[in-house]
Amino acid sequence: MNTSIIINELKFKAIRSSGAGGQHVNKVSSKIELTLDIMASAGFTDDEKLRLSQKLSSRLTKSGVLLLQCGDSRSQHKNKELVIKRLLEILKANLYIPKKRKRTKPSRAAIKKRLDSKQKHSLKKANRKKPSL
């Protein structure tokens, strides 16, 4: 993943924020909509494109475009920074490949210790019973 190429390929669109507000909210477009065409991007390898299309299938449009919006701040520039940051976090999280777990076997001493503690616990419980005559 080449972040500088990806950031250059991003398309931004300013929209009016929804919700309550005064006179100012009706004339200012501070909400930012970011679009990224994953399949046409040169910032990803073919394997990364395939992985992202599978992982982000619920977030992509039918044409394979990722849409993100941010209207948290009143400032358009701040919203732009926030949405870029959010995009990079989503991409990194979905491109991360977890390591395969190596199965391990407990040591002989650990097995012996476990069995001894079980035996000790069993004797403790057996000693609570009334003796059989």
Image: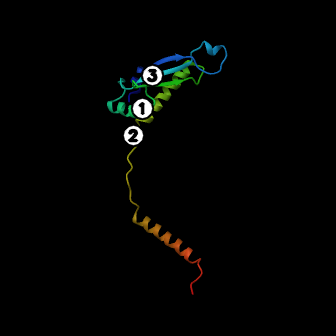
Cβ atoms under marks 1 and 2 closer than 8 Å = no
Please state the horizontal and vertical placement of residue 4, each as a whole percent of the image. Answer: 41, 24
For badge 2, the amino acid type reads Ile
Q: Residues within 10 Å of mark 2 (few under 14, many from 20)?
A: few
Residue hosting label 1: 57
Residue hosting label 2: 97
Please state the horizontal and vertical placement of residue 104, each as a whole percent of the image. Answer: 38, 56
Is disc 3 placed on a helix, strand or loop? strand
Residue hosting label 3: 35
For badge 3, the amino acid type reads Thr
Q: Residues within 10 Å of mark 1 (few under 14, many from 20)?
A: some
Query: Which numbered disc, 3 or 1, marks the residue that appears first in the sequence?
Result: 3
Residue ID at (49%, 28%): 85
Query: In the rendered image of this protein, does residue 116 appear above or below residue 19?
Result: below
Left or right: where does residue 12 sit relative to residue 30?
left
> What quarter of the picture does the N terminus occupy?
top left
Is disc 2 placed on a helix, strand or loop? loop
Left or right: where does residue 28 sit relative to residue 39?
right
Quarter of image, res 70: top right
Residue ID at (58%, 78%): 129
Please state the horizontal and vertical placement of residue 30, each as a whole percent of the image. Answer: 57, 18
Judged from this view, the residue extending furthest toward the top is: 27
Quarter of image, res 27: top right
Please state the horizontal and vertical placement of residue 107, each as a whole percent of the image. Answer: 40, 63
Inter-mark Cα distance, 3 to 2: 25 Å
Is disc 1 placed on a helix, strand or loop? loop
Query: Which numbered disc, 3 or 2, marks the residue that appears first in the sequence?
Result: 3
Q: Residues within 10 Å of mark 3 (few under 14, many from 20)?
A: some
For badge 1, the amino acid type reads Ser
